[in-house]
Image (cartoon, grey):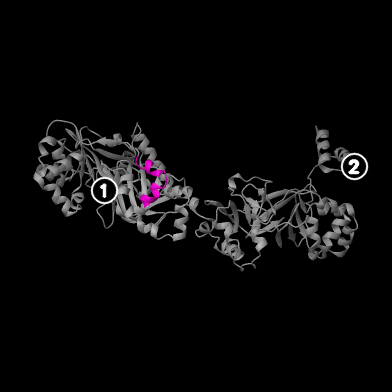
Amino acid sequence: MKTFLICTLAIAVLVTLTSTARSPYQQVLDHSRIRGRQHGPNVCAVQKLIGSNKQYYTNCKQWYQRKICGKSTVISYECCPGYERVPGEKGCPAALPLVNIYETLGMVGATTTQMYSDRAILRPEIEGHGSYTIFAPSNEAWAALPKEILDALVSNVNIELLNALHYHMVDRRLLTDELKHGITIPSMYQNLNIQVHHYPNGIVTVNCARLMKADHHATNGVVHIIDKVITATTNSIQQHVENEENLETLKTALAASDLSTLLEGDEEYTLLAPTNEAFAKIPEATLKRILGDPEALKDLLSHHILRKAQCSEAIISGVSVETLEGSPLEVGCSGEELTLNGKAIISKKDVLATNGVVHFIDELLIPDAAKTVFELSSASDVSTALDLFRQAGLSSHLVGNERVTVLAPQNSVFKAGSPSVNRELFRNHIVKDQLSSKYLYHGQTLETMGGKKLRVFAYRNSLCIENSCIAAHDKKGRFGTLFIMDKMLTLPTGTVMDALKADNRFSMLVTAIQNAGLTETLNRDAAFTIFAPTNEAFRAMPQEKRNKLMGNAKELANILKYHIGEEILVSGAVGHLIRLKSLQGEKLEVSVRNNTVNVNKNPLVQADIMATNGVVHVVNTILEPPVIKYDISLDSGLAAAFSKVYQRHFRVPQALKELRRLKH
């Protein structure tokens, strides 16, 4: 909360300082200014990644985490772009001299680019008149080039070097506010495009090289320092796939789908390209099944395509990115490595294409939409249940092309041991048709493979099928859906009266129900919740009181009706206090404490004995309706009037209503 408030305050200061909307880069730079202002004017706080030369202007989140890509950082305070220190004065009070681009390169530390400009005979151009933008590689960027590439650039009468430098230039002034996400800019080398991406976290990239220090003004343009030497590309994503030997299997898979055309088009994507080795890691039967199923194949390939270009340099923490298939992938980083769903499986990154970027991955990402139910279970907490289905001989329903929904209890249900394998019981955990929980509704019935009808109960915070409630999000596969349930199903076998008669613990309750004339009520087609007192509960009553109660049918019926709720409430639906109206009229308070469901603060001995017209919960206590106490100060005349009203109407609420009328 403290962090949030400080960040909010920083943002408020930002808004005050700026009258117009700023780009994400400028917002992060302004935040760095706020963090550095205690050190003097025009000082920016910079986070440096320990053990590397990487540094970042800090945003609010990174400031408090003190980490970039999970690695620790140190804070330093440097002059903001365009300013310099003055001996004896605090901060960076002086603006850098406004000079031409060539001289600006030297002032901002891009001395290697300046040197190669001399060597390529570019200096006269960037010293002269005009308006240019140059994306100048840092000294470290030039040093990181493989020796053979650098040698090739500086040979051949320097024409290749000049071409390379011209590719880093645009023939007009472009500041970061104008470097919009997704635009392409013609370079000064044969008008070949430079791709710009301006991410919400303030990172700006050109051809996936990050702008480290931007917006250095010059008399004839602007200089941006970037962390790589960039090269032009003329290949689409699809062409990269076709030209790469290590993507032969992917090329074959794309050819069997209609996605090749998509990856040749103009819209930008990121392809997470599985290598041949990635495909080889998948069981042969699984791969054959997917490759032979056009819909599953399309889902598989679409799951490897992100809906936007995602350069690795833009990832400084985790971000959820939607795939073309529709499900999200968590893209993150660990030091220098890019991660997918927390795994460092990207073997080669930032292969630039005319319509996006390609990252090579060494594991296949199989989405749920392309999996069988058995495959879905491998990444879910239901492995014990799926093994029981297999032992029951039901595997064919879970691996084929039959549309089913499997109600699979989570592993914690079997902590006390697995039940004996009952084929019929497990057949009734498989529902005909592939369902989605968001389309289920209260009162719906579902047909099982065992021929039974299961009821759906929708509560405020729970969705239950008979006594078993859905404990996690659905996992929807190619043909089957996995519902992860909080317990094994209990199937109803008769009415609530039948359930009570079949259990010796309730012989005294059954007699009481018969004496009270409620047998017909509990056999009718309705929806009841019975909090059923055991014989032990009846015996705990003083004998005289019990005999008196059993001999008074009217009072007995009143007590028993208070044990009967007017709707079906299964235990899994009780996550907070529920006030359940009883047939007697007063409400029962059902709650949960220490994982035990209570009614009127009395724990249930057993829950969820399912019946065709309700559910039975076992209690070891006789529940008594609350005694209503009314604190009314009456004079003798009103008291007499109240007495007459009460005798006439026999009901306290009606008497009170009449009393209020008399008072007024």
511 left or right, relative to 291: right
Task: Assess disc 2: are there few (<14), some (14-19) or many (≥20) residues with their C-alpha within 10 Å of its C-alpha.
Answer: few
Give the SS element for disc 2: helix
Q: Is residue 110 visible?
A: yes
Query: Split into 4 quadrants, where in the image is the C terminus?
Result: top right
Residue 30: % across, % down: 31, 40
* Residue under numbered circle 2: 647
542 left or right, relative to 84: right
Q: Is residue 604 visible?
A: no
The correct choice, above or below, for 184 with respect to 247 in the image is above
Residue 660: % across, % down: 80, 36
Q: Could you tell me if the residues under marks 2 and 1 are in contact, i.e. CB atoms within 8 Å?
A: no
Seen from the viewer's position, the closer of residues 296 and 418 is: 296
Give the SS element for disc 1: strand
Q: Which residues are magenta?
A: 250-264
Type of the residue with mark 2: Gln
Seen from the viewer's position, the closer of residues 481 and 396 is: 396
* Residue under numbered circle 1: 77
Residue 87: % across, % down: 16, 45
Q: Residue 275 sits in which quadrant?
A: bottom left
* Secondary structure character of the magenta stretch overall: helix
The correct choice, above or below, for 586 with respect to 608 in the image is above
Q: Is residue 65 magenta?
A: no
The correct choice, above or below, for 335 with respect to 387 in the image is above
Type of the residue with mark 1: Tyr
Q: How far apart are the two marked residues, 2 and 1, measured between alpha carbons? A: 87 Å
